[in-house]
Amino acid sequence: MGTIVGLVILAVVDWYLVRKTGLHIHQWVSKKYNDYLLGKQNKK
């Protein structure tokens, strides 16, 4: 039962991100990580 609830929560989060940003979860995480790395390089 917990697995089903977890999948539903992930689906809702993904739906929300697609609505707000146009990106799926993996694309959004990749973009945020890339921004983090670029910011880290700019501080040097």
Image (cartoon, rainbow, N blue to C red):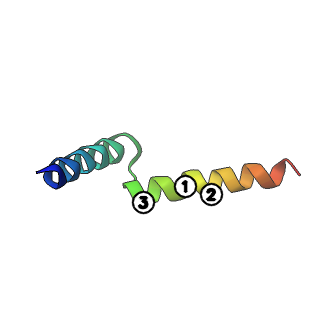
Q: Residues within 10 Å of mark 2 (few under 14, many from 20)?
A: few
Q: Residue 8 carries which label?
A: none
Which residue shows up at 27% across the image and 50% down it? Answer: 10
Which residue shows up at 38% across the image and 49% down it? Answer: 22
- Residue 23: percent from left, percent from top: 40, 53
* First reached walking from the N terminus: tag 3 or tag 1: 3
Q: Which corner quadrant of the image does residue 19 belong to?
A: top left
Which residue shows up at 30% across the image and 49% down it? Answer: 14
Q: Are marks 2 and 1 in contact (CB under 8 Å)?
A: yes
* First reached walking from the N terminus: tag 2 or tag 3: 3
Residue type of the residue flagged with mark 3: His
In depth, the one of 20 and 34 nearer the eye is: 34
The secondary structure type at the circle numbered 3 is helix
Q: How crowded is mark 1: few (under 14 residues within 10 Å), some or many (20 or more)?
A: few
Estimate the spatial distance between the alpha carbons at disc 2 and disc 3, rounded to whole Å: 12 Å
Residue type of the residue flagged with mark 2: Asn
- Residue 32: percent from left, percent from top: 56, 50
Estimate the spatial distance between the alpha carbons at disc 2 and disc 1, rounded to whole Å: 5 Å
Which residue, given by chain and number where applicable, does mark 2 sit on? Answer: 34
Estimate the spatial distance between the alpha carbons at disc 3 and disc 1, rounded to whole Å: 9 Å
Residue type of the residue flagged with mark 1: Lys
In depth, the one of 18 and 13 nearer the eye is: 13
Q: In this picture, is 18 found above or below 30?
A: above
In depth, the one of 22 and 1 nearer the eye is: 1
Q: Is residue 33 left or right of residue 12?
A: right
- Residue 5: percent from left, percent from top: 16, 47
* The furthest residue to the left: 1
Q: Are marks 2 and 3 in contact (CB under 8 Å)?
A: no
Which residue, given by chain and number where applicable, does mark 1 sit on? Answer: 31
* The furthest residue to the right: 44
Which residue, given by chain and number where applicable, does mark 3 sit on? Answer: 26
Which residue shows up at 21% across the image and 53% down it? Answer: 7
